[in-house]
Image (tube, rainbow, N blue to C red):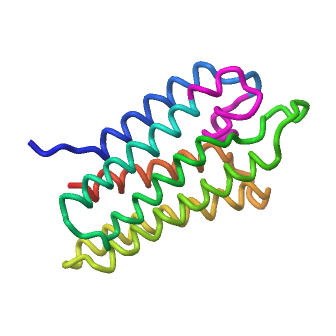
Amino acid sequence: MKQRFFPLAVSYWIVIIVTAHFFSQPGYQWTENTISELASQGHTYKWIMQAGIIGFGGLIMLAAGQALFKSKKILSPTLLVAFYGLAIFLAGIYCEAPIDPSIPYSVTEAKLHSLFATIGGISLSMAILWRMLISQNGRERIVHLVFLIAVIGFSALFGLAENGAIDVGRGVIQRLLYLSGFAWLVYQER
């Protein structure tokens, strides 16, 4: 029986996200606030989401390492997936700024969280692109292209919502971004 570590990592992450919502801080709205804000500085139950982010990153690194070991090819899109896992793991160590602006926080820590999350997104996008470019048939290329467009498109929308250029909830867009990335992680392991 084939072990499927990427679906395990995605399932773990989803369970933690749902659980963390039950312990969200006052004022948290899933349509407006990000998943990272469930682990924001100063939040009593930030450890739940922090464990989720770190655990997800660790499981992705484990899954990618296992896939690289089995394939005996170090230079493959899976290497970028491993970097994605590492970046997410590191993003989990550093927490987002609190949603309550009156709570003091470390700007450096919030910036490090954002930096590692961005590196993770770039790594995942590059892995999808690489997988698309090396696909042997046209159908596979199209499927990977659709995932790439979804990830980049939702990332761009998130940036526009973050900067107030569009009036759409950041929380909704980020969850769609995660959904497209999760779907690709599961799809590419099959």
Residue in the foreground of this view, choosing between 37 and 48: 48
Q: How many marks?
A: 0
Residue plotted at (78% across, 35% down): 98
Tell me the residue at 35%/54% (across/down).
185
Locate residue 16 relative to residue 167 in the image: left or right. Answer: left
Residue at the extreme left: 1
Look at the magenta stretch and give its main secondary structure: loop
Magenta stretch encompasses residue 33: yes
Query: Nearest the camera: 122 or 108?
Result: 108
Query: In the visual, does 159 lie left or right of 11?
Result: right
Look at the picture and state if 164 lies above or below 133.
above
Q: Relative to 153, is 6 above or below?
A: above
Picture coordinates of residue 96, whole percent (x, y): 71, 42
Measured as percent of width and height from the top left, residue 106 is found at: 82, 42
Q: Quadrant of residue 153?
A: bottom right
Q: Is residue 94 magenta?
A: no
Quadrant in the rendering for residue 22: top right
- Quarter of the image that includes the N terminus: top left
Q: In percent of the image, x 28 and y 44: which residue is there?
A: 5
The quadrant the C terminus occupies is bottom left
Residue range in magenta is 28-48
Who's the residue at 25% across and 76% down the image? Answer: 135
Q: Position of residue 188 (x, y in %)?
A: 28, 59
Where is residue 133 drawn, in percent x and y?
33, 80
